[in-house]
Amino acid sequence: MRLYSTLQRQLVELPPPPAKIGIYVCGPTVYQRIHVGNARPYVIFIWLRNWLRQRDYEVELVSNITDVNDKIYDEARQENRASTDLAEEMSDWYLKDTDRLGLGRPDAEPTATETMDDIVALIAELVESGHAYEAQGDVYFRVGHYGDYGQLSRQKPDQVEDQEPNPLKEDARDFALWKATKEGEDTSWDSPWGKGRPGWHIECSAMASKLLGPAFEIHGGGLDLVFPHHENELAQSRAAGQEFAHIWMHNGLLRLTGEKMSKSLGNVATLKAVLDDYGYPRSRETLLLFFMTGHWRNPIDFSPETMMQARTQVDAFRELFRMKIDRSTQQFPQGWDPEAEGLKFEEALDNDFNTPDALAILHKARSAWDQDFIKERLGVFGLDSLAAPEEEAPVEIVEWAEKRQAARATQDFAEADRLRDEIAAAGWEVRDVSVERGYQLVKRD
């Protein structure tokens, strides 16, 4: 299994199974409902966990919830409410919105507030070792003391801009590990440096090491987190003597009309709205297949057109499973070799988790009417429902469909059309397929 790592700038081989693979993924900052772009890393890394487990790895997936952050304070002030209430409400909506994707949950979803003792202890360790210093209640990491700063993002240390201006800092490049409580902030925690709250970067270092240990295989998140968030995570963790993550996976961002989707730009489509607007629960399948169409490292364009293209593909797979095929006598078309194509499917996912290539093989299987091949592989992507048996048509509807077939056989097309309309009025659709397969009855959405 090979995955591209931003740190090494190349594909990196995982240890062979049954090795333990720890995965830490940066989850949302809960100040608003998540947009559909936030769902992409959630989906990708649950898929990756599923595939690694199928390949006999022992996998633990941790995805945090950032519930202490400047954005939460700012949003709470605008709404004239307590920051804790806002964070709690948005955390709840995040869980409910992502539950609707039908993929299950990460193995652990820690929050900053429940990891506060570990955060304070990690900062104290960095202060004691000289990698950090206190300045009137704030604590800053000394970027100049960490010689490998910039190794992840390829930022040159002498060209790093001031991330958090403060005249008390020793070096403009230094970043905050702890922030003294300021006016308008309604929460604080005790620390050796006074009441305050952690900086964003140190939260993830503490949560990752607490749950996965000082060294683990994969750290994931969106491409926009490479700098400064992940660069700072890597620096402070390794300065504390932790090996930390070996592989750094950064997924491409969703683009809306060619521009990255973000709350700050105001060009967002919430996950809730997307799932509602495209007709839940079918929208769940459509969105998951849409994510499959783009390689995880690349940007992907989100639009009504691309969603409808994904919906068409979803419907094509479902149509196959509506067919009554006698598998004991089924003859595959020339050129379709399930065993060879199965190996290609495995290679596609083992080689940098290439879901577009895997999807292309599933479509090839669809063209060959190989239901078993597809059904065995849908579970990785949470698309088992495409192969699930659908509601059986009532006896009366089946009788109408049989009479319609008889009318068509005698070329009584007026009667056939009348029966088709009766079937539609009852909430079903009759579809003509090949002569050998007759017709299908499909429950209408």
Image (cartoon, helix red, strand yellow):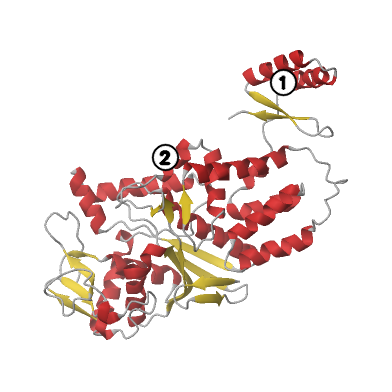
Task: Find residue 387 and report its horizontal and vertical position in percent.
Answer: 68, 43
Mark 1 is surrounded, within 10 Å at the Cα level, by few (under 14), some (14 to 19) or many (20 or more) other residues, namely many
Is residue 388 in sight in this rendering? no
Q: Disc 1 marks which amino acid? A: Ile
Q: Secondary structure at mark 1?
A: helix
Is residue 208 in sight in this rendering? yes
What residue do we see at 54% from left, 75% from top? 11
Most foreground residue, 52 or 170: 170
Task: Find residue 298 and report its horizontal and vertical position in percent.
Answer: 49, 61
What residue do we see at 58% from left, 50% from top? 382
* Quarter location, residue 324: top right
Q: Secondary structure at mark 2?
A: helix
Q: Where is mark 2, residue-wise?
A: 273
Q: CB under 8 Å between callouts 1 and 2?
A: no
Q: Where is mark 1, residue-wise?
A: 397
What residue do we see at 83% from left, 51% from top? 333
